[in-house]
Structures are given as C-alpha cells and as structure tokens.
Amino acid sequence: MQEGTVLEMRGIHKSFPGVHALQGVQFTLRKGEIHALMGENGAGKSTLIKVLTGVYSKDEGSIMLDGHKGEVSIKSPQDAQNVGISTVYQEITLCPNLSVAENMFIGRTTAGAVLKWKDMNRAADKILKNLDIPAKATQQLGSCSIAVQQMVAIARAVDMDCKVLILDEPTSSLDEQEVEKLFKLMRDLKSRGVGIVFVTHFLDQVYAVSDRITVLRDGKFIGEYTVAELPRLKLVSTMLGKEMDDLADIKEDKAVNSQKDEVPVIEVEKLHSTTGIKPFDFYINKGEVNGFTGLLGSGRSECVRAIFGADKTIGGVIKIEGKKVKIAAPIDAMKHGIAYLPEDRKNDGIIGDLSVKDNIILALQVLEGFFKPLSEKEKNKFAEEYIKLLDIKTASPETPIKSLSGGNQQKCILARWLLTHPNYLILDEPTRGIDVGTKVDIQKLVLKLASEGMSITFISSEQDEMIRTCSRLVVMRDGRVVGELTGDDISQTKIMSTIAGE
Amino acid sequence: MKKYLAIILALAMVFALAGCGAGKSDKITVGIINNDPNESGYRAANDRSLKEMFTEENGYEASFFYSLKNDEQIAAAQKFITDGVDYLLISAADTAGWDTVLKDAQKAGTKVILFDRTIDADPSLYEASIVSDMAKEGQQAVDWLKSQNLSEYNIIHIQGVMGSAAQRGRSGALDDEAKASGWNIVAQQTGEWSADNAQQIVQAVIDAKTPFNVIYAENDDMAKGAVAALDKAGITHGVGGEVLIIGFDCNKWALTELLNQNWNYDGQCNPFQAEYINDIIKKIEAGETISEKTIIMNEKGFDATTITEDDVNNYGI
Amino acid sequence: MEKKTNILKKFVGNQLFIPLVALLLLIIFNLINDPSFFVITILKTKEGFPVLSGSLISIIDFGSELAILAIGMTIVTAATGGQDISVGAVIAISGSTMLRVLCGTNPQPDKLLAPIFVAFLVGALAAMLCGAFNGLLVAQFKIQPMVATLILYTAGRSIAAWINENRLPIIGEPSFGYIGNFLPGVPIPTPVFIAIACMIIIALVQKFTNLKLFTQAVGINEESSRLNGINPKFMKFMSFVILGLFVSVAALIKVTRISTITYSVIAKDIEMDAILAVALGGNKLSGGKYNIWASILGAYVIQFLTTTLYKLQVRSDALPAYKAVVVILLVIISAPAVRDKFAQITKKIKAKKAVNGGV
C-alpha cells in the first residue's frame, strides 16, 4: 500500500445467481480526498460499497486499510465500523423520534452501561458546533430538516473515528442550499484527513467537491481519473461506454403545442388540498408538456397529488375536457385517464415483493376491476412488450421488482402507467436517482408521447431537464404558484429569478 | 386505542360493581363473588341456584360479581366489605392471595363463607367452606365400575385440564384402582374438558386397533366427544354395548343419554351449594356455632339401569 | 447433473418445501415406529354403512377445520400483516347462532325449527359480522390486528353463551350429524369434502378475481397500492369478512361432529394452530406475498403431528411440550435466516467438491 492511502481494494469479484456483479474491481482512496464513485445503475457501485461495508461477502479479492497489516476481513457492518469505515445512506437510517444526541451515541460501546445524559448532550453539542451543524443535542431528530439529519448521521460516523466515510447518494433529497452546507461539511472533514467516497448521480456535484473519480461500467473497473482529466462530457461517455451527443439534440425536438383557444385536457380552478398548498389554477392542453418547478418543498408535488386525488382535496374544481369531474381518490383520476408516477419510488411506487410483471400490469388491472383479472397470457404479453419497449433490464418478468436497479424499477412504474394509455401523464421526479442513459431515454420518451397527443406534466429537481422538455413552466414558492414561464422565458436565470421573486 | 379499551373495560367493571351498593335495611345483605357463569353448565346451574335462593322473598339482598380472574375478585371483595355487606360468599378463581382481604372482612364484621372452591387461608378467617370432594366423586365412579365385574378392563381415560381439582380427584381414584386391580389403561390423555379433543383421543385408539371396553371421561362433554368417535366407527356403547361410558357433572342432557341407555354411569358434581349456605347463615343469625368448617356436599352417581325420569329432572343441571 | 441440481434448487426454494419435508419426516417416523399407522380398514357404522377408518383418514378428517381456517388466516395475514386471534371465539359465536336457529329456546328439540342450510347461512352471517367488526377496527381505526381481535377473543365465548342464554342445545336429528361425520353410504368423512369444496372455491376466487394480487399489493406496500387505485382499507376489511366466512364453515363442522357445543372450550386455541399453519407454509407473518396451498399443507402437517402424538400416547400433560418442541424446530428451519445459512453451507460444500474434482 502506498503512503497516504487509507483504503485499497483489489481484484474484487462478487457474483449473484445469474449476475457477475463485480469483475475484478479496484478502488483506491487517499487520505483527505473526496473520491467520486461513478457509473450507471447496475454498474456495480452499490455492490462494491456493500462489499466494503460487510453487507455482502466478496467472492474474491482483497481489501487493505491504513493501519492494518495485510488484508482486513469485513464480515458484517459491525466489522466495517470497527475498522473505521462508516456509511451514510440516501435514506436516513437513524431514529427520528430520538434526540440528536441519542442518535449520535446510540449503540456505541463507549457509552458504557449507564448513560450520563448531561455528558452525552455536552459531547454531542461540542461535535455539532465543531462541524458547524445547525442542530441542538436535545432536539428531536425528526424535527430537523433532512439535510441536518444527514449531517447528524455524518457527525455520528465521524465521531466514531472513521477513516473512510462513504456517502451514498446523500444529496438526492436536499435542496441547493442544503447541498452547499453538506459540501462545506465534506470539505471540512477532508481537511481533517478523512477519506470520503462520494456516490451521486448529480454531475454538477461531482465537479463541485471531488478530487478524483473512479468509473465502473457493467461490473468492471474502467479507470481512475483526476477531475481535471475528465471533463463532464467525457465522464458521461466513459460511464456509458459510447460517445454521446444525444443530450444536445433533445432540445430541438421540443414539442410546442399549445394553442390558447382549445379546451384543455385538464383544467383546475382553485384546487386546494390538506397538505398546506394554497389554492391553485392549472391547465394542460392536448400534446403539451409542462412542468411544476420550485425549490424542494415548494408544493410542486402536492399540486399534482391533489389533481390525482392522492391527497385529500378541500376545495376547487377539476374539469376534464371542459366537464366538471369529482376526484376523491386515485381510482377516480385513473378512470378519467390520469396517470401519476410518484416522487417516492420506493414507498409510493413499487410493490417490492411482487414480480416485475405484476408491477407492470397493476394499474391496468385495477382499472379493469376486481372481477376481471387479466389472463396469464395477456399479463405476459403486456409485461414482455413493455420490458422490450422501455428496455427494462430484468432476469425475467417473474423477478421481484425490488431486486432491480433503481432506474429499471422506475421504468417498470412508467410501463405500468403507459399500459393504461392515459390522456394525462404526471411524472414526478421520474429521473431521480437513475443513470444518465435512462434519464435521456425518459426525456425522449416524454417528448415522443407528447407528439402522439398525450399531455404530460414533468417535474424534476434538475432544471436543465425541465428546460429541455417543457414548453410551459409553473413556478412555485412556499405552496403558492408565483409565475408561469413559456417559450424563450424558460431559462435557468429566468426560473431562478421567478423562484426568488425578483 | 389501547387506552380506550382499558377505559371501556374499567367502565364495565364499575358498572358490574355499581349494582353492589347495598343500602342498610332489615334484609340480610350478601355479596356473592363467583366465576363467570358462561364457564360451564356447572357454573350456570350454580349461579342459577344462588339467584333463586338469595331473593328478597327469602329475606336477602344480594349483589353478584363475576370474574375468572383472582385479582378482580379480590378487588370486588374489597368493595363489598366497604359497602358493609353482612355476608361475603366467595367461589375463588385461585387459592392464593386472599389473606389480606379476609382479615379486612373480619375487622369490618363481614362474615365469609366459601363455596365450591377452598382457598389457602387460616380457617379462622371464614365461617364455613362448602365443597365437593372430587376424589370421592371419582371413587364412587370407580367403585361402580368395579362392581360391573367385567372379565377384563381396557380403559380409555380422558382427563380434564391437568392440575385442576376435578382432574386430580377423578384421575386419582382411577389410577389407584387400576394399579390395585390390574386394570389396563390403554390410553390416558387430557382432553382439556373439550369434546373435540376427546373425540380425537378415542379416534386415535380406534385407528391403532387397540381393544378397549371402558371410556372414563372426566366430564360429560368429553364423554360426548368420545361417543361421537365410537358412533363414527360403528362401535356400540351403553347398556348392552361393547363399551361402557362413564361421564361426570350430571348435565341434564347427559342424564338423558343414561336414560336412553347410551351411556352407563354419570357422577354428580353438586352445584347446589345455595341451600347449604342458606342453612349456615340461618344458624349464624340464630346465634348457633358452626361445628364443622368444611362441609362436603352429598353427591350421587347414576347408573343407566336404575336412573329414572325424576332423577333427570331433579339432578340434571 | 447440472440440470438435476437446478431442479433440486428450485424445489428447495419453493414455499412448499418446508411443509413437505415436515410431512415426509412425520411419515418416515410413523413408518419406523408402527407401519400400521398407514393401514386403512373398512368399518360398519351403526346404520350399517361401510366407512373408511385409520389414522390417515383421521388426519384428513380432523384436519379439515384447520385447513379451512388456514385459507382465511392466510388472506388476513397477507393483507394486514397481522393475525386474527378471535377465530376460536368466533367459531363459538357462529356455532351457537346455528344451534339457536335450529333449536329456538328448547335445548333438545324433537324437530328442527329451520333447515340446516338456513341455520348455516345465519351462522355465517354472524361470523362475517364478527369479521366485519375486526376488519373495521383494523382497517378504519388502524388498530393492530392482534389487539383488535383481542376484544372478541376475550368476549366472544361469553357472547356465544349469551346467544343461547346459556342453554346447551343438543341436536338429535341425525341428518345434522351427517355433516360432521359420514353421509349415509359415503365411506369418506363429510368434513373432507367440505374442506375440498373450500379449496376449490378459493382456487376459483383466485382465478376469477384479483383477490390475490390486490391483497398482496396492500400487504406489501399500502401507499403504493392506494396510488394505484386500490382501496387498502376495503381490502383489509374484506379479508376479515372472508375469514369470517371460512370460520363459519369450520364452526359448522365443529358443531355437527358432536351435535352440540361447549362455549368455553369449542375450538379452543385453534387460532394458534391456524396461525402456525400459515407460518409453516412459509408465508411471512408480516404480510405480503402468500401461497394459500402452502398454508393448507401446513394445516395438515399440524394435524398429522397432533394425530401422531395422540397415537404415540405421549403422556398427556407433556403433550403440549412435545408439540412445542416440534413446532420450534419447524419454524426455525423455515426461518429465512436459517435457510440462507443452509444455502451458504451447501454452496461451500459444492465449491469444495468442484475444487477437488478439478484436481
């Protein structure tokens, strides 16, 4: 092992039934660096991290750590923690109903048999202050924002004397300001000599904080680069394994399809739900792609959820092709040809233990009714058709959906709704947490569907995606619609200024 | 929601006790603590006889409390004592834990009479205890069985819930005699007072082709279950049948089975303590002393060959 | 060779594997212990009809109620991720209702007051009402199923006694007993046919409705199901009502076996066996995916065990302990953690073999 290296993984192999997930992967982490681990979904990032943290046992290969002679054997997450490897996951794994301090010290051998609350709180406050985390030791964790919770998780990891800190998609539920705070913390830790493995899908973020990048593709190690060596476009093409200028092309296809005089497919007046958004008006025409934008928590998801009947509405009118309809529950919306791909794929989208097939046919099946099950033949036909159409990577239609990668799960949910042939499709963060290739596929598909006459509302945290796909943007701030942008007004700066209210 | 449940249960208890407030009058006030009458036919008959005895016409003012839980019973007893009842009649769910409350009763001048079940307490703390002798019930049945002079005894013994007083008494008598007379017990298992279980136990013996000619079931329900298995296999039973049937408790329907010659013997477990209690109260009120604290009730056993219609009506519960 | 191991693997991975292995073990044990266990003979009933008799017949006969209950319990478990512990008490209620309809206020009627079929319908209604009550508490008020059903578990037997005002009705009419015993001239016990009928019905329901897909979806992810247009509350509610229906069928068998009822002990603890059947069938007790056939097989395995223990004349007070030991073994074997470990070990052995073979 070289001087200054904290972690070295060599020749890691890992197989699952039918998949050779890691094929001789290597990874080196130096002291005090932020090292981005990049790759498409299914490239092997998660598997590599799970091997490193003891969730999976490796089939072959060696892991060496600074301060340990020879190989270290990591058989369980506990082992990983003991040798100084800590992980902070995308989903918060702490206990929201305990205090910040309790969360930081829970389950730690050093706490001793009898906890001294005062000491614990004092120690926690010191760490929080040290790392400049805006939380109090005695505060209930659940009352902190997601970003702060994430920072507490990091603080906990750091305080456990970790040498290697793994951040697995830490930013996907944070807004820009929060991301900045997190980066500040990361840089701070870096200066203290902690080696950070950073897994993310956001290219901007990679370039904002990382020193080096390791790229995996199809379970193989592709290369290790400094940030300067690998500019953005090159990174994308390395990840995809092909030269890519599709991204640039997309904009040209953008559908401009909004004549003012036609009757909107969906029209909403003063719709108001119990989630805290203010009554809002909205319409969408046939073949139009529009979007809700705003900061996280500005109410963009709540608006579409109200239209779909996912949240309880307490006022307002929904008209479909000019006719007033009542939507009290999702099934009502579905019957009127509305489809909704939810923001939270894991909790609101997939039915984890069910097969890919059952997940794809679910919405159609519900629409058909309880007493009209589709035949096995029809189910198989639909499933195979959409697996092919959307290029869903699955061993078979019978595979449980939870064992698919995030991007492929998302495609299944998309397939589920496309199968119902909706007139109006709502896509809430369809590209979150999925790889670049699939993102492009989805954006293209949106435009294609719109050109075929489907009306689509597209919501994304990545503004460039929305700019590329939407012909009209509804801008929200604090639960209120604050503006609408069309045509040339749809630009990064204009959106920002509208959100900011300038 | 758990909380609501607790409140509902608490309210139910309060209502149950609300009827207990005994105003002072010339009537003798009694507080009766019993097991839930739904528990068995025996208990239902027992409760009925108590209700028929302790009426206003008979000069009583009675309040009832039912529970299968000892702590609830003790709490109710405490309440009755506070209300100042003259007599406290208790059929305890459990033998232990009654010391304190009985001492309180003594202090308050409430006289205690135990019925059906004894408790572990100093006899000075109660006036009398009226009980069945389960061993005697068992012995009577076993004596009857012996008197049948069968050429061989191959017995299926279906026991009650293990450890219960009735099971210990009734099993004990059979076990002793089987040892002494060399009777063959082909199966001995607990049916837990349940007809279903008894049916399966007998079915297992039938399936195993083990010969047997006596079924000794420790209550009527289990005897009925056993007979169901025999009927299914076409094995005759009762007077003149291949298998002798013995049951306990003298349910009316069971005695009818005897009358119809389907069964052979049924041992009584007398639920009618009310008369005995009434006698004792009358004696105490008259200033007499009770010589014998533990009173064992008379209990009969009925033979199918001698039982009459009147027996069924008089002793059936 | 490769193909063979694949088939083996597939079989080991199947949900039916554990109950089948348990069944096989019990069969082997009985074969060694006393092969006469498997002998089926023909007996003549009182009426002179030939009927089949033997331990195997007893198992499929007495296992009927449990198999029927296992069907409903599986559905409730799948939809709600909890279990109904009031099953035994509701059997008492439903059975008591049937007898009340047949007997009125006369405990030993000479003539039945209503056709048995009508009595069954009323009893089924009573059981489904109990199910609806449980379902309402679970679906609408979001009470944990075990806690919600605790209410009827506690109060049910008293309600059953109250329905008949504490009388003990006894039905003399022989045709009533046919249901729980033998139909005249049919050598196989009637409950077996009833159980088979229930299985056919649930198979048809699963084929011609979306019950399975929807309950599984609700059990796995309630919020996702709602956003896909399923009404999770209604599905949970219905699962209890369906269980109620099966409970009433089990109640019918129970009361017709002996033509009477004992409120306090009828079908005592049967809920525990029914839950065990679901678990033994490898279904997750936390809900979600299920295999109804595995539960049914589990039910018969439990009855097989019970009959074996009765046959063995295990000392009566030790009987529950023996049963518990067997149960613990079965459940441990079927636990996912143990199965994973098992899979690991076999893989290691295989790897070693491969290495040795290579040299």
Image: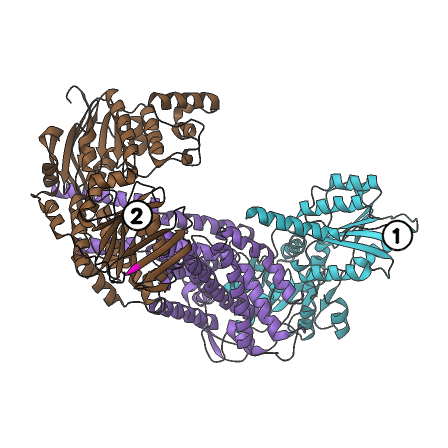
Chain colours: A brown, B cyan, C purple
Report the span colored magenta.
A257-266
Q: In the image, is residue C30 above or below residue A77?
A: below
Which quadrant of the rendered structure holds the N terminus of chain A?
top left
Q: Residue at x 9, y 30 (%)?
A: A229
Q: Residue at x 70, y 61 (%)?
A: B44
The label shown at residue A343 is: 2
Quadrant of res A151: top left
Quadrant of res A203: top left
Q: In the image, is residue C246 above or below residue C25?
A: below
Q: Nearer the viewer, residue A217 or A24?
A: A217
Q: Is residue C74 magenta?
A: no
| SS assignment at label 1 | loop
Magenta-drawn stretch, dominant element (helix, strand or loop): loop
Q: Residue at x 58, y 74 (%)?
A: B236
Could you tell me residue C179's position as x and y percent?
A: 51, 74
Mark 2 burial class by Cα count in 10 Å: few <14, some 14-19, many 20+: some
State if disc 2 and disc 1 touch (CB < 8 Å): no
Q: Is residue A265 magenta?
A: yes
Residue A140 in sight: yes
Residue C272 in sight: no
Q: Amino acid type of disc 1?
A: Ser
